[in-house]
Image (cartoon, coloured by chain):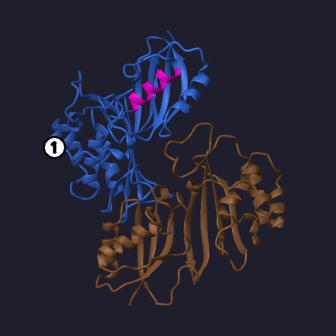
Chain colours: A brown, B blue
Amino acid sequence: MPHFKLTLAYDGTAYHGWQVQLEQRTIQGTIEQAILKLTGQSVRVTASGRTDAGVHALGQVASFSAECRLTLSELQTALNALLPDDIAVLAVEEVPAGFHPIRDAQWKCYRYVIHNGAIRDVFARRYAWHIVQPLDVAAMQRAATALVGTHDFSSFETAGAPRETSVRNVSRLEVSRDGSSPQQITLEIEADGFLYNMVRAIVGTLVEVGRGAEPESWPGEVLAACDRSAGGPTAPPQGLFLVWVEYS
Amino acid sequence: MPHFKLTLAYDGTAYHGWQVQLEQRTIQGTIEQAILKLTGQSVRVTASGRTDAGVHALGQVASFSAECRLTLSELQTALNALLPDDIAVLAVEEVPAGFHPIRDAQWKCYRYVIHNGAIRDVFARRYAWHIVQPLDVAAMQRAATALVGTHDFSSFETAGAPRETSVRNVSRLEVSRDGSSPQQITLEIEADGFLYNMVRAIVGTLVEVGRGAEPESWPGEVLAACDRSAGGPTAPPQGLFLVWVEYS
C-alpha cells in the first residue's frame, strides 16, 4: 500500500491539539476524516510530534498509508478541498513504507512569538504571548547561549510520556526583536528533538531574564539543576509554531 | 461635558461592521456598552467612517462626550479591560467639543492585503483575499497611477448613503509585493475621503489587470466612465484595514 508524507500548516486555535481524543476536535482526527471521505479508508495519520491545544504549525510533517488512485497533486487538491480553512496541505510526497515521521526526524525548528507592548495586539491574540512589561531581548539572547549544545534538558520538560533520555542537541537558539514591528519578539530554536513542553518552558525561563527578575546566568543554572521546578513558568500555547521538520 | 477622541484597533471578523444594528454585534455597540459600564452613561460614539462587516482597523478614530472622573490613561486602561480582546483602545485624548471625526478628517489611509498563492494561508484567512492565479503586481501598480489625483470616483462607489459629491483626491496608491513573504500583495491608498466600498472596488478592478483579464489602461477608462458597472468586482471585506486617519 503506498505511503504518503504530508507537509501541513494549521492554526491550532480551534483544536484540542494534534492527537485524537474522544469527542474533541483535533488536527489528527480532522485529517483522518478528510482521508476517509476521500478514499473510503480509515487510516491512522502519524505526525512528527504532537502539538498541544492552541499550538500552530507552519510545516508539520505527517504520514499515512492508503490505497489511492489520484496523482499526488490531485490528492493534495482534494484534501485541501475537504479540510477546513484552518488546516492546509502544503505538500504531498510518496515515501517508502518504512518512513516514520517521528523516528526519522533529524532536526526540528520551533518559533515562539511574544507581543511585547503596553496594549494588546488584536491581530496577534491567537498567535503571540502578550507581555506588557518591557523585555530586555539582548539579555535573553545572551542567557540563551547556555542552552545551545547537547545537554540534559529535564529542567525544561513537563512530566509527560516517558522518554529514553532527556538529552537533546540544541543547534540554534535565537531571540530577536522584529525590525519592522519592534513590539514583536521572536524566539527560534532548532534541535534534534524536543521534550514535552520544552520550548514553552525555555521561553518562560528566558522571559524571567528579559523582565529582570533573574540574572542572565540563571537559565544555565536551571539547565544544570535537571529539575523542572528550578525553571520559569511554561509559556502559553498560542505563541508557539512548529516551523519545519528535516529528514535525512 | 468633556469630549474624548479614541484611536482604535479592531479585528472585524466577529462583528457586523461598525454601526449599531438591532440584535447584531457591532464595534460601535460594543464600545458604547463598555462606556456605559464604566461611566453609567449611554453615549453615542461616532467614528471617522463606518467599516463594513469583516473589515479591520489599525487606527480608526472615534469620539464621544461623557462625564468622567478618570485620567485619560485610566480611561484607556479601564476601556481596554472592559472591551473584548478583538478591540483595543490605542490612545485616548481630550478634544474640543466641536471635534467631529468624520467632518474634520483630512486624510485617511486604507490597506488591502491579498494572499497570492496556490495554497491558502491558514493564518491569513481572516486578514487577506486569497487569489490563486498569479498576479502581475507591476502591471497593477502602473494601472493604478491613473487613479491618483482628484477625480470623480463614482465608478468605484457602491450605491449607498447619498453624498454631496463623488469627487475625491487620492494622494497615494501603491501596490507592492512583500519582500520577505512574496505571496503577500499589499495595496495602500491615501485620500481626503472615500466613497462607499471605494477601496474594495478599486482592488477588484486592479486585480482584473493583475490576472491579465484587462489591459493596464482599463482602470483609467473605468474611472472616466463614472459608472460602477464599468469596473471590476468588489473585493471581499476581510482583506481591508483602515490604517490611520489624519486631522488638522
Chain to which the residue tagged by mark 1 belongs: B
Tell me: A199 left or right of B42. Answer: right
Give above or below for A216 relative to B119.
above
Whole-percent x, y for residue B48 in the image: 39, 26
| Magenta region | B27-38
Dot 1 lies on which element? helix
Give above or below for B56 relative to A52.
above
Residue depicted at x 48% and y 67%? A21
Q: Quadrant of the N terminus of chain A?
A: bottom left
Whole-percent x, y for residue A188 in the image: 64, 62
Q: Nearer the viewer, residue A42 or A170?
A: A42
Tell me: A147 left or right of B233. Answer: right
Which amino acid is tagged 1?
Ala
Q: Nearer the viewer, residue B148 or B28?
A: B28
- What secondary structure is the magenta-colored segment mainly? helix
Mark 1 neighbour density, 10 Å: few (under 14) some (14–19) many (20 or more): some
Magenta-drawn stretch contains B28: yes
Q: Nearer the viewer, residue B85 or A30?
A: A30
Magenta-drawn stretch contains B185: no
Question: Where is mark 1, residue-wise?
Answer: B230
